[in-house]
Amino acid sequence: MTIRERLTAEDFVFTNSEKKVVRELLNNYPSAALVSASHLARCAGVSDPTVARLANKLGYERFADMQQALLDEVASHLNSPMTMLSSSSRSLGSGELWQDYLQAVTRDLSVMGQEILPAQFADAVDMISDPKLRLSCLGGRVSGFLAAMLQWHLQQIRPGVHLLTHDRSQLADRLVDFGKRDLLVVFDIRRYEVDVVQFAEAAAARGARIILFTDRWRSPIAQWATIVFSAPVETVSPFDTMTPSLALMEALIAAVARKHGDSFAKRMERIEAARAPYNITVDQKPLAAAAPNRRGRKPRGIQ
C-alpha cells in the first residue's frame, strides 16, 4: 500500500489528534510529509509524539522511515520519459522488442483482471447507466484520448454524455453547472496534471460523483472519487502504457450497452437514420465510379 492508501484505508483507526495530521498530509500531499516531524506537528496543531505515533500506526518504525517510503513513491510516479528510458532498456528480455512489449502488456492485463472487484465494476456500470446523471468525461494531455473514446461510445448508448476538453477556460465555465446530478469520469495517469486535479476537486465539492481511471500510485483525485480503477502502466517502453485502462474502459462500455439492451438498439437505429442523409460512412453511400487513369482505363474491379 502507498502512504496515501494507508492514510485513507478503513483498516486504520486514528485518534482525533492523529486525524489532524492525516488531514494535513492529505491536503498537502506529498509535500507535507517531506518536512520535519516538528514542523508537521505545528502545521497540524498537535504534539511531536502524535506524528511519531501516526508513523508507527502506518507501519513505520520512525517518521524518517515514512519519509523515505514517500520519497521512493514520488520517484516512481514522477519519472520522466527520459528517466524511464534508461530503466526500461534494462528490463528488455532476449526476444524482439515488440515481443517483450506485448508480453509485458499481456502480464499487465492479467494482473489487472485479478485485481478488479466485481462489485466495484458493477457499481460503475450502474452509475454510468443512470439516466438521472449527466455524464462528463475528462482526461489530460494524453489520457484525454481515452476520455474522448469513452464519450463517443457512451453517447451512442445514452443521452447526456459530454466531453470536457483540456482547456482551463472551458473547464471553469463548465464547472458552474456541476452539482449532485453530475457524474465525472476522469482519466489521470502519472504525471498527474494540475488542471485535471483541480477541476475534479471542485466538481466533488459541488456534489458531483467521480469515477477515476489512474495508475498504481493513484492520482490525488482518488481522495474525492466514488470509484477508483488503478491499472498497471509500466512496460519496456519509456512511456507508460494505457492499454490496461483502455481495455477496462471498453469492458465498461460493453457492460453498459448490454444493460441498456433494447433501448440501446433503438437509439442506434435513430442515430443511423439521422446519419444517412449526410453520407458519413462509406457503407451509407455507394462508391462513385472511379475516374479513368492516364491511359483512359478504369481501375481493375470497376465496371
Image (cartoon, rainbow, N blue to C red):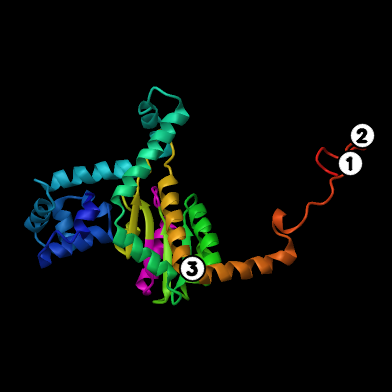
Magenta span: 189-211
Which quadrant does the C terminus fall into?
top right
Residue 251: give x, y in percent of width and height. Answer: 43, 55
Image coordinates for residue 148, horizontal then vertical, percent: 53, 57
- Residue 154, placed above or below residue 34: below
Q: Residues within 10 Å of mark 1 (few under 14, many from 20)?
A: few
Mark 2 neighbour class, 10 Å CA radius: few under 14, some 14 to 19, many 20 or more:
few
Taking depth in this image into account, of 243 and 210 the one nearest to the observer is 243
Say what amino acid the circle numbered 1 marks.
Pro
Residues at marks 3 and 1 touching, judged by CB atoms closer than 8 Å: no
Q: Earlier in the sequence, mark 2 or mark 3?
A: 3
Residue occupying the point 9% across, 60% down: 47
Q: Tell me the kind of residue under disc 2.
A: Arg
Q: Nearer the viewer, mark 2 or mark 3?
A: 3
Would you place residue 65 above or below residue 143 in this image?
above
Alpha-carbon span between mark 2 and mark 3: 54 Å
Residue bearing the label numbered 3 = 261
* Local secondary structure at mark 1: loop
Decide which of tag 3 and tag 1 comes sooner along the chain.
Answer: 3
Q: Which residue is mark 1?
A: 292
Left-right relation of 49 to 40: left
Residue at (50% x, 62% y) in the render: 168
Labels 1 & 2 near each other (Cβ < 8 A): yes
Mark 3 is surrounded, within 10 Å at the Cα level, by few (under 14), some (14 to 19) or many (20 or more) other residues, namely few
Mark seen at residue 295: 2
Task: Indicate left or right for 185 with 69 as reference.
Answer: right
